[in-house]
Image (cartoon, rainbow, N blue to C red):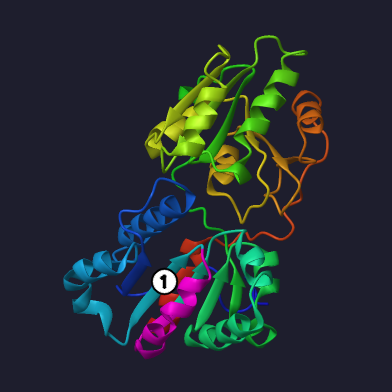
Amino acid sequence: MADEGDGIGPASVQPRVMRVMQWAQHPGPVGGVTRSVEDLTCALRAVGHEVRYVDTGSPARAVRSLPGALPILWRRRCLHLFHITRVWRAIVLSPVFALLPGRTVLVLHSGAVQRQIAAQQPWRARLLRLSLRAYDQIWAVNADIGAALPDHLVDRVHIVSPFVPGPAPDASTASREPHLLTVATNSGLSHYNAGLAVDVVHLVRRDWPDARLWILAYDQDGPDLARLRESVSDLEWVQLSFNLTGAEVSAALARSDVFLRPTDWDGDSVIVREALAVGTRVVASDVSARPAGVELSALNALEMAVAVVRPGRVSDGKGLASLTVADAARSALAAMAG
């Protein structure tokens, strides 16, 4: 499996202006994947590259986005980045990427990719093995995802971080609130375990009576989120916000004493990286690789509450990359220009 030492590290020479096609939902749902894609676009445009989109949200949306994409879609010197969380999309669009004349990259964002691959029936596994040959490179957001891919692709697989760092936060403007904990949940889905975070803070309040929980919910306001909202409606120490802007999420993290990440699985969470970048403590489940500095806990309320009050194990970052998706894109563009 390739990493920073295998020809995909940060480019030492700024390449000439190149073309990049982002294959992703655009606009995408609020969340880490969309944040990663948009921040990558901003980083590449900031150094003069031309970036356009093919909207993969649906076939109809893709067709509507084609007029804007066509001027660069079939250019030989175009970098195509296909961002997905569901492996079947790589199969469906593999014939298209096999025909494109530029360099094609499949970006696997979700920690659920491992589970999807493991659950495949034999015929689908064979089809995936064949389909992945259509992509020149595969960027996975942690080493476990990379290891789950077929062995014959090892030279194409690179581990990258989806987090694109922005300007260093201004510590002088941060007003951190003691014993304010935050947790993020996509639509209240069960594997984000926002309800467990409520239980954690309930236990933490035995030691910190003033502890509060701020739930940062995003994407769909459906039945799961409705149940979560109802479950905390009579808890005066719980606040729930929905679909905050990126700037508002950053501000919430900067105000927080601790960010909780009690997920059942993860890739390389953008919001965890962002919390660390603004100097917020992160306490996360030890179910997957975590960035260096994250405080680890077993996935249960009691042990996570103990980790909040009395910090314990700290992640060394093994299994994740320091190389960002922006670094990888700049390196790929430099190689194409050379």
Which region is colored magenta?
Answer: 86-104
Point out the image quarter for the C terminus: bottom left
Q: Is residue 27 left or right of residue 248?
A: left
Residue 202 in percent (x, y) is at 70, 19
Looking at the image, can residue 89 be seen?
A: yes
305 versus 208 height, above or below:
below
Look at mark 1 in the image and give the residue it sits on: 81
The residue under the point 47% across, 65% down is: 84
The residue under the point 64% across, 26% down is: 198
User: In the figure, residue 189 lies in which quadrant?
Assistant: top right
Indicate the amino acid at tag 1. Answer: Leu
Q: Is residue 164 left or right of residue 80?
A: right
Does the magenta portion include 95? yes
Residue 184 in percent (x, y) is at 54, 37
Does the magenta portion include 260? no
Residue 101 in percent (x, y) is at 34, 89
Which of 185 and 291 lies nearest the eye of the viewer? Answer: 185
The residue under the point 50% across, 68% down is: 107
Which of 93 and 10 lies nearest the eye of the viewer? Answer: 93
